[in-house]
Image: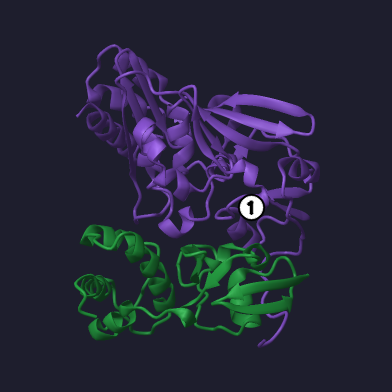
Chain colours: A purple, B green
Amino acid sequence: MARTGAALKPAPFEYSAPSSLDEALALLDDDSRPLAGGQSLVPLLNFRLARPERIVDLNGVAELAYIRRSGGVLRIGAMTRQAALERSALVAEHWPLLRQAVRFVGHAQIRARGTVGGSVAQADPKAELPVALAALDARFHVRSPRGERTLGAGELFAGPLMTTLAPDELLTEIEVPPLPPGARTAFAEHARTHGDFAAAGAAVVLAPGHAAVALLGPVRARDAEAALRGGAAAPEAAALAGAEVAEGHPRALTAELVRRAIEAARS
Amino acid sequence: MRVALDINGTPYEADVEPRTLLSDFIRHEAGLTGTKVGCEHGVCGACTVQLDGEAVRSCLMLAVQARGRAVRTIEALDHPLQAAFNATHALQCGFCTAGILMSLEPFLRDRPDAGEAEVRQALAGNLCRCTGYEAMVEAVRIVQRGEA
């Protein structure tokens, strides 16, 4: 052993490592933060931007890590690693949009630890997975000692880095319905450096009689979707999607990425 | 708290606070200073080590979270990549090199025939500010051709 007590970046906290969901739920309150993959929370701890009194480490809660399909519906446990989503043959075959999107999340080293549920609950407005999940009409299962509830993306995401989850609630599962028959999907984004947070991004699901367009936020571009269902050309729908974001460069970039995603999904 | 970790097959034990990062445990408690610490928020990749065979950022994990897992650092690496990096001058100051090698080894294990674009993507999570990446890409090609 070299020297002891040398370097400490985060502010002090109590550390709990529950091994079951019930145990974890009993530990969550106003002063605690759940720790999933840690790829967003640990930087915040290192900068002391987050100073929770207690860290509830979910990495020992094995019951929250799974990818399975039942009745045509995909169920992703909140503690599923992004790398597991990326490698899943089931996901690649039936929900290709998730694989198309997860590859843009950070780098391989980040995806090895980062979790799907963490990415959702962090609600970073630049995160890719919430965009893909919003386009897929995913449902989010939430538990607390008080009970269970299930939310759509519009009910869960409340703004940049904000969700409607109460401090004692935990996202436990993400449920993704089957794609409509004949659906084609695409994800497009632009980041100044590979692996960086994107400046703009879009997920597209197209099927006969169905269109979903989601942008970073996540935001559903409803006008663009209606236009696509009415047979609009890609540039026209893309311009409507661009109108969802701030004028100028973000709008031009978003519209161009949506156009590319529509064309990729139609090709 | 008492934390006992397996690093490179050797047990290391220390009394540390729960807030101790894995990167700091490796350097300051285990004394394994081959692992470098750069940005400490997951951007630069200098602190990359392997956890159960996968490349991870050791600055984005608490030391206590590595209990019961196999941590592997540059000190345990014995791979043709090292000779290839030497041959192509793929490092200058060397600060990023440990993280890059610990990232590339599992990448080549999983994707032995990866093309150049994929190799460049695999390098994207590690910042080098001296040489650039050309020589690193060439070093990987040498290993893939079995010439290292």
Looking at the image, is B85 positioned above or below residue A141?
A: below
Q: Chain of mark 1?
A: A
Whether residue B103 is visible, yes or no, is yes
Snapshot quadrant of residue B132 = bottom left
Whether residue A47 is visible, yes or no, is no
Looking at the image, is B111 positioned above or below residue A8?
A: above
Question: Horizontal placement of B71 versus A34: left or right?
Answer: left
Residue B23 location (% of width, % of height):
58, 72
Snapshot quadrant of residue B121 = bottom left
Residue A88 location (% of width, % of height):
41, 42
Which residue is painted at 68% across and 65% down in the image?
Answer: B64
Looking at the image, is B25 positioned above or below residue B126?
A: below
Looking at the image, is A72 positioned above or below residue A36?
A: above
Residue A79 location (% of width, % of height):
58, 45
Residue B139 location (% of width, % of height):
25, 75
Which residue is painted at 24% across and 33% down in the image?
Answer: A264
**Residue projecting furthest to the bottom:** A2
Snapshot quadrant of residue A156 = top right
Which residue is painted at 61% across and 54% down in the image?
Answer: A41
- Location of the N terminus of chain A by quadrant is bottom right
Q: As rendered, which of B138 and A72 lies closer to the eye?
A: A72
Q: Amino acid at mark 1?
A: Asn
- Location of the C terminus of chain A by quadrant is top left
Q: As rendered, which of A257 and A42 lies closer to the eye?
A: A42
Q: Secondary structure at mark 1?
A: helix
Residue marked by disc 1:
A59
